[in-house]
Amino acid sequence: MQKIKKLIKTLKGRKRIFIQTHNYPDHDAVASAFALHYLLKSFKIDSNIIFHGDILRDSLQKMIDTLRIPIQPHYKYELNDDDSIVIVDANKKNKNVAELKGEVVAVIDHHPGVEHEDVGFCDIRSDYGACASIIFSYFAELMLEPGREVATALHAGIVFDTHQFTRNVNPLDIETVAMLYHVSDIKFVNLLVRNSIKLDDFRQYRYLLDRIMINGVFAYCHFPDGCNKDLLAILADYIISAEEIKFVVLSAQSSEGISFCVRSEMNTIPANTAVQKLLSGIGSGGGHVDMAGGRIPNAKDFDQENIFRTGVAIVTGKIRL
Ligand SMILES: [Mn+2]
């Protein structure tokens, strides 16, 4: 059976359906939720898009406003046990997905993960560069062309999540964008990509360039006064763009302890396993081989010097993964 048919079967007749993104959603998560919402509507299935946390980047807020994406913080609705939840761009029980009232009935994700048996519909394709490409495949199954707004969102989601086709790209991501290209507002997508930071972010760039600690191919910097998670990722990408640097760890104080952002260009040191090793016993982490994130919940367990030393030991192979 076509995936989309199975999903529709899972959702048909349910009382209230919520499409939940991962916490602090990014372009891909919002685009995926928006396109799915639109697709379900064509089957006369109503849904609401919800998230936990904040919309951190202005470029994402601009995408939401311009394309009129109906996304709301989950507390705007009073969720109850009868509600059904579809998680996009993340999986059930992930640390970055708030556990809300209601039943998780479907999961659509492109991160490595397990299919939970109690979830009626799971579509996990970890070889895809963006969740948006999975959602588009449902349109393709139905030979349905998304409208301009949806196409533009999906296009942006894929471009952002693959870091402009340089990371985790699957030929299917490229084919998806090729198809969307006829419909989407290309100028707007390019505008979002080019205007991803604000002048105010320069303070964090300056701090980073002044304080970054480098040992061989390894670079580390901690932001004791905090740095929002999305900017932290942009800064990690910035540092890894230096030719000599092959492995980057950035950390920042946050309301949830210490947040970590990791980038790897080393085949032998996957970012997702390295972050788990780096934080073992004091925190947790996960992600892809070339990009990962993590958290130490209790800031008291954090020792900047120790993170740097351990990072160097991992990258030089003194600590085996
Ligand atoms: Mn994604």
Image (cartoon, helix red, strand yellow):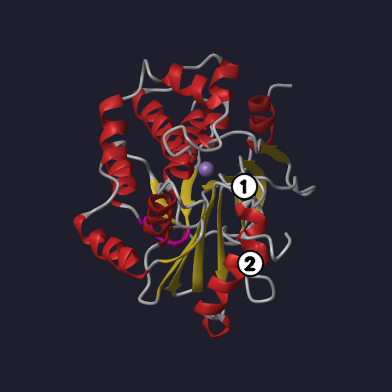
Mark 1 is surrounded, within 10 Å at the Cα level, by few (under 14), some (14 to 19) or many (20 or more) other residues, namely many
Task: Confirm if mark 2 falls within 8 A of ligand 1.
Answer: no
Q: Nearer the viewer, residue 93 or 256?
A: 256
Residue 190 is left or right of residue 167, and the answer is left
> Mark 1 falls on what kind of element?
loop
* Residue at mark 1: 289
Residue 72 is left or right of residue 276, and the answer is left
> Mark 2 falls on what kind of element?
helix
Quick check: 63 above or below 250?
Answer: above
Quick check: 308 above or below 269?
Answer: below
The amino acid marked with disc number 1 is: Val
Q: Nearer the viewer, residue 197 or 100?
A: 197
* Residue at mark 2: 313
Q: Position of residue 258 (x, y in %)?
A: 50, 73
Mark 2 is surrounded, within 10 Å at the Cα level, by few (under 14), some (14 to 19) or many (20 or more) other residues, namely some
Magenta span includes 55: yes
Residue 226 is left or right of residue 190, and the answer is right
Magenta span includes 3: no
For the N terminus, give its image quadrant: top right
Q: Residue at x 54, y 34 (%)?
A: 45
Quick check: 257 above or below 130?
Answer: below
What range of the chain is rendered magenta?
A: 52-56
Along the polypeptide, which appears first: circle 2 or circle 1? 1
Q: CA distance from mark 2 to mark 1?
A: 18 Å
Could you tell me if residue 14 is visible in this image?
yes
Residue 238 is left or right of residue 311, and the answer is left
Q: Are marks 2 and 1 in contact (CB under 8 Å)?
A: no
For the C terminus, give its image quadrant: bottom right
Q: Residue at x 44, y 38 (%)?
A: 31
Task: Confirm if mark 1 falls within 8 A of ligand 1.
Answer: no
Residue occupying the far left of the picture: 199
